[in-house]
Image (cartoon, rainbow, N blue to C red):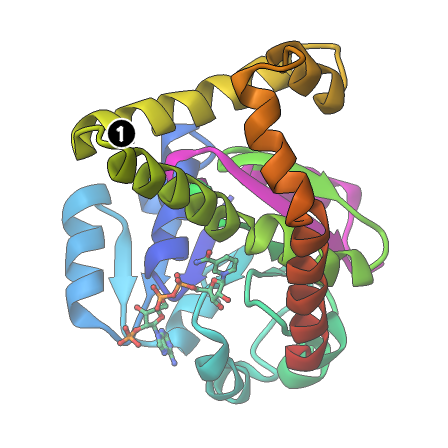
Amino acid sequence: MKIVFIGGGNMGRAMLSAILSEGLAAPQDIMVSDKNKEILKQLKQDFDVYITEENIEAVSRGDIVVLAVKPQNIDNVMAELKGRFNSGQLVLSIIAGRSIATLKQGLGYKTIIRAMPNTPAQIGMGMTVWTATEEITEKQRASVGSILKAMGRELYVTDEQYIDMATAISGSGPAYVFLFMQSLIDAAVDMGLPPDAARQLVLQTAAGSVEYAARSDKELAQLRQMVTSPGGTTAEALKIFEKDKFPELVKQAVAAAYKRAKELRS
Ligand SMILES: NC(=O)c1ccc[n+]([C@@H]2O[C@H](COP(=O)([O-])OP(=O)(O)OC[C@H]3O[C@@H](n4cnc5c(N)ncnc54)[C@H](OP(=O)(O)O)[C@@H]3O)[C@@H](O)[C@H]2O)c1
C-alpha cells in the first residue's frame, strides 16, 4: 500500500509516524509533499520517507492520498490536483470543515473518506470519527480503518453531520479538558501547593480517573457518587459546580462549537 501525504505538519506527521510504528507501510512506500522545506527535511531525517515539494508528482504515487494541509490552503491544493486522480486511488481528507461534496467537486473525484482526528493522535491516543463515499470498497475502508486505529480509537459513521458534531466534542474536546486541568492546577497553587506538585496531582488524577472510568462497568454518575460522602469535602465542591450550573455551561460551550463547525463547513 503506497501512501502519500499532501502536508506533513503536525497531523500529517502524527499519522505517518503511527503508520510506520504499526508496520502498516514501509518508509519506501510513503511520500510526503509539503511546501515547507524544513518540515520535509525533518521527516526525511526522522523516518526516511520520500519527500517532494510537488503535490502533483506525489499524487501519482499513492494508493491512498492523505490531504493534511490547513483549511486555508485546501482550495489551492484542490485546484492543483483536480483531475489528477486515477480509479483505484483513495483520498483521505482530515481537513476540518471541508465537506465531502466540496472535496468531490474541488478534486473532480468521488472516492473520498473524510476524517476528524484530534491532537492526542500525536501519541497514538486520538479519537477519529470518519465517513466515506459509496465509491469506497470494503478493502479500502478496512485499510483506512487500520490507519486511523494506529492513531488511537476510530469510529465510522454513515451520516456526515456526525462529523460536525464530533468536531465539537472530540475535535475541540482536548482543549476543554486542558482548560479544566489548568483551572484545577491554578486553584491548587492558589491554595498553597508548589506548582510542580499541583501539576503532578492534576495530571495523574485526570489520567487515573479516565482509566478507572474506562475499565469500570459503572456509570460516570455512580463513580462520582462513590467519591462523594454526605457532608464531606467532595460534596462541598460539587455544590459549587451545581450552583454555578457547570453541566449547563458545558452544554452551552459545546453548542457554540457545533454552531461554529456548521458555519465554517463548506
Ligand atoms: N491539529 C488538530 O487537532 C486537528 C484535528 C483535526 C483535523 N485537523 C486538520 O488537520 C489539517 C492539518 O493540520 P496541522 O495542524 O497538521 O497543520 P500544519 O502543521 O500547519 O501542517 C500543514 C502543512 O501543510 C503545508 N502546506 C501549506 N500549503 C501547502 C500546499 N499548497 N501544498 C503542500 N503543503 C502545504 C504547510 O506548510 P507551511 O507551514 O509552509 O504553511 C504545513 O507544513 C488541518 O486541515 C486541520 O483542520 C487538525
**For this view, does 139 lie left or right of residue 210?**
right
Decide if ligand 1 comes within 8 Å of the CB at mark 1: no
- Asked if the stretch drawn in magenta spans residue 7, the answer is no
Furthest-front residue in view? 231
For the residue pair 214 and 70, the one nearer the viewer reads as: 214
- Asked if the stretch drawn in magenta spans residue 141, the answer is yes
- Rendering quarter of residue 27: top left
Residue 146 in sight: no
**Vertical side of 163 occupied by 36: above or below:** below
Residue 108's spot in the image, x, y percent? 68, 82
Identify the element where label 1 is drawn.
Answer: helix
Residue 256 in sight: yes
**For this view, does 225 lie left or right of residue 13?**
right
Residue 83's spot in the image, x, y percent? 61, 83
Which residues are drawn in magenta?
Answer: 121-148
Q: Which residue is mark 1?
A: 198
Residue 224's spot in the image, x, y percent? 66, 20
**Vertical side of 139 occupied by 130: above or below:** below
- What crowding class fits label 1: few (fewer than 14 Cα within 10 Å), some (14-19), or many (20 or more)? many
> How many numbered marks are there?
1
Identified at 22% across, 31% down, the residue is 192
For the residue pair 201 and 82, the one nearer the viewer reads as: 201
Residue 79's spot in the image, x, y percent? 53, 89
For the residue pair 62 and 225, the one nearer the viewer reads as: 225
> In what quadrant does ligand 1 lie?
bottom left
Identified at 58% across, 41% down, the residue is 127
- Residue type at mark 1? Ala
